[in-house]
Image (tube, rainbow, N blue to C red):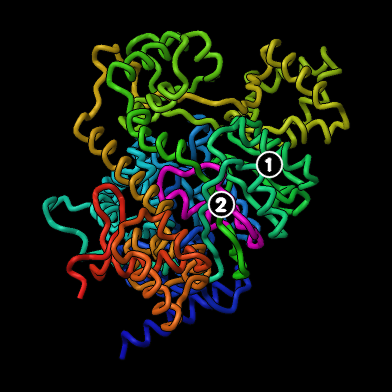
Amino acid sequence: MASGSTSDNQRRAIHTILKQYWGFESFRPLQEDIILSVLSGRDTLALMPTGGGKSLCYQVPALTREGMCLVISPLIALMKDQVENLRKRNITAYAIYSGMTRQEVIHTLKTVINSNCRFLYVSPERLETALFKEYLPGMHVNLVAVDEAHCISQWGYDFRPPYLRIAALREELPGIPVLALTASATKEVQDDICNKLTYLPSNPNKNSLHDWKVFRQSFERANLSYSVFKVDSRINKIIEILSKVPGSGIVYCKSRRRTKEISELLQLQNISADFYHAGLGQQERSRKQEEWIANTTRVIVCTNAFGMGIDKPDVRTVIHADVPDCLENYYQEAGRAGRDGKRSYAVLLYDEHELRELEQLPSLRFPSLDDIKQVYQSIANYLRVPAGDGEGQYFDFDISDFLKKFKLNSYTVLYALKALEQEGWLSFNEQVFLPARVNFTTGKNQLYEFEKNYPLLEPVIKTLLRAYEGIFDYPSPISEMMIARLLREDVEKVKEQLRQLNQYGIIEYQQQKDTPQLFFLKSRSRVEDLSINKPGYAARKEKLASRIREMIQFIGTTNQCRSKMIGVYFGDESMNDCGICDNCLRKKNISLTQEEFDDIHNSIVATLQNRSLRAKELLSALGSIKKEKAWKVIEFLQAENKIEMDESGKINLSSARP
């Protein structure tokens, strides 16, 4: 009785919080079950599609209890968005991520401990720093939420070694449940997530899977039609699709250059389009994204850098102009269509040459150790980092300039960087945005004298002191644009005045960085001492080859429901045929009545009497009978051993035929 009462109280509490902060009357499917599992203290794994409301699954239970939720996420942009959205609801939230200075991290951690903080978002590489561990005991953590949990598995498509540190963190938080969240993970990756996130100091050999409660939302998307087309001209097919399907769309491409080319070709056809990739500046990316969300731009042509954390419900079409390298990526990206429940289309375009290139990808993605060492040495030379130095430091890294100076293959460099990141040597981030920072380096008496001697610089000094509390104690992020507005001055003039104050030694002024950053996770090693885990490296290479084979099979299969194939890949065996993908529609179009089947059967038998024909000749001899229907009967007769094909490819009546 008490248990039922507790459960009822929890249900009432979580519905009250849902209504109070988000204004919703009810939860989406599975959300309530996941939340109640977390509240019961169980470690929980939730597989929910992109846009399925994963964040509420940790936000709601965390708000039912005293203390705060620690959220681990690799996506800086997503962290910032979540913090902003929570604050809009008057919920205290902070984030600590790559790019923050030590002083900023200390200030944030002190604020978290001394305020009514309910959510702290942390990037995984921050977890085991001495600084974070120092403040952890004072945080009163009530739940650990691990977003993008597939990153912990070396069998996953986006393995990130810093995630492996989460289990050790649990030693500091005994009894605190973990909620792991991901949009897509195979059964193998699901098991790996549960094992890797379980801290078992007393019995490390114990199987942890039975301790986890796993919730998996169906991979079925009843309103989303999957189609695959082999094409000669991608742009012509894209234009054809967009002309037939009105509304907002996304076109995914593999290269930045193609995003620009395709968007310009669409514009020539009077289709409102723009392009997006990680190489664009922060402000430009934000502008393009906002214009697309507001439907000012109809179609965004982009790399896979676009889409994380964007919940635009009315996307009618997602077109892949290039083949993704795994079904995990494809499912996530295609799933951005039709979140409002209305009919939408996911279209994948390909040609045979691309499939052959895809098969060669494992060799490209996993360079040799010699290649990795060459890239590492070249980076050290380029950045002038001596052996034994560099740990914990960020460096501006212009990859185009680097490639030009060292005459290296761009793909080799890109994947060597990935290998070095996965082995814990360094990390490369193209989307680091470091705001401008100012810290006063002079005393208040000296500052007063300076203002008297340089009256033209007094307004900018006063504005800094009024707008940014604590700017005397630690480097504060500032906005030159906001200061310019407050002073009613041109932003370039404000930047020049800040540079002058820096030269006079009044402040330390670090200008905004919106350039790719390379971060040394360890001190720079001598290249002969650089090592990688060879068995693990080889296993990941084979896993990529396996995922590519699954992707190619998905493309080439024409007689199975595509939605069902995706479900089976992720371990969901319960799905029925969707009825709306290209394969399901093809089956409907070639459905045969018994009378039709008998007529075609008799025609085939009569045509093959006393002779053998190639398939093309047989179809031609059958005259006006539809090829698709004829093939269906031919496949049936072959399966029933009533006709057979010899080594030369000719079809004849089976000798075993009754």
| Left or right placement of residue 217 versus residue 318 in this view | left
Q: Nearer the viewer, residue 412 or 80?
A: 412
Q: What residue lies at 30% left-to-right and 50% top-to-bottom?
A: 649
Q: Residue furthest front?
A: 610
Q: Nearer the viewer, residue 128 or 335?
A: 335
Q: Looking at numbered disc 2 in the image, what kind of residue is underneath it?
A: Gly
Using the rendered image of the protein, determine whether residue 110 is visible from the camera's viewpoint.
no
Residue receiving disc 1: 286
Q: What number is the disc on residue 309?
A: 2
Picture coordinates of residue 324 (x, y %)? 46, 44
The residue lying toward the viewer, choosing from 285 and 344, is: 344
Residue name at image x 44 percent, y 14 percent = 408
Is residue 185 shown left or right of residue 268?
left
314 falls in the magenta region:
yes
User: What kind of residue is marked 1?
Assistant: Ser
Q: Residue furthest bottom?
A: 1
**Quadrant into which the C terminus falls:** bottom left
What separation in Å lies between label 1 and label 2 (alpha carbons)?
Answer: 13 Å
| Above or below 171: residue 516 | above
Q: Given the current orientation, which residue lies at the most extreme right position?
A: 488
- The residue at the point 46 percent across, 55 percent down is 331
Q: Position of residue 290 (x, y in %)?
A: 71, 48
Q: Could one spot residue 95 in this view of the protein? A: yes
N-terminal of the pair, mark 1 or mark 2, is 1
Q: Which residues are magenta?
A: 310-336
